[in-house]
Image (cartoon, grey):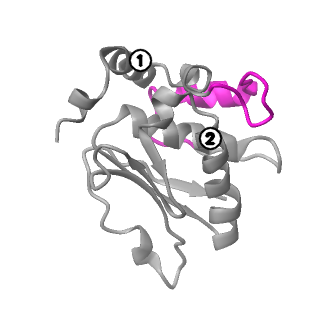
Amino acid sequence: MNVAAKVSKDDLDAIEYLQKHPEEFPYIVYDKGPDGQPVKLEEWQTECLKALRKKKRISIRAGHGVGKSAYLTFVIHWFMLTHYPCKVPCTANSQSQLFDVLWSELGVWHRCMKPEFKRLLIHKNDRIELSEDPANNFAVARTSRRENPEALQGFHSENVLFVIDE
């Protein structure tokens, strides 16, 4: 499927630019933050988004309420919109962390997207899909535990991003 044929030249230019500049992604893609105000990142979020240019693995240790879930949302949306094809398996230490925190945050920020970007992603209860090619481009919520390690097995794509939330 030629997804590029379904996206405008301006959108393709923006996506190409954003792939190389992940730290600018939130400012370009989201119309506003969940509070209705312009998007504002914490310094550590900007630095960690910049790190995506070079690093294959990023780990963040921080307290509660500092913006880790928002950061993961930016990363997931950025990866899905700038890497084709892609698969993004997401997990957390509990179902409530995965769905009530991370997946909820993904939904909040999806609603904040500018229409030209929002239309590219379909947000579902346990899955986010690229609207033009959902079988090959998606993020999926999976709870993985010691007794269920296969939850994160079998994801194959040219571009795979594993997201593991606290």
Identity, as a three-letter code, of the amino acid under mark 1: Ala
Query: Is residue 144 toward the left or the right of residue 107 in the image?
Result: left
Disc sitting over residue 138 in the figure: none
Crowding near the residue tagged with mark 2, few <14, some 14–19, many ≥20 C-alpha atoms within 10 Å? some
The residue singled out by tag 1 in the image is: 14
- Residue at image position (58%, 37%) is 74
Residue 18 covered by magenta stretch? no
Side of 53 where 109 appears, left or right? right
Q: Which residues are magenta?
A: 31-58
Q: Which residue is mark 2?
A: 111
**Discs 1/2, front:** 2
Which residue lies at the image location 29% right of the left edge and 38% below the top edge?
Answer: 84
Q: Is residue 134 above or below residue 19?
A: below
Which residue is nearer to you in this view: 45 or 14?
A: 14
What amino acid is found at the position of numbered circle 2 in the picture? Answer: Arg
Measuring from the top left, give residue 41's x and y in whole percent: 72, 26
| Residue 42 rendering spot, x and y as whole percentages | 75, 27
Q: Dominant secondary structure of the magenta stretch?
A: loop
User: In front: 134, or 163?
Assistant: 134
Residues at marks 1 and 2, CA–CA distance in whole angstroms: 19 Å
Residue at the spot 83% in from the left edge and 47% down from the top edge: 65
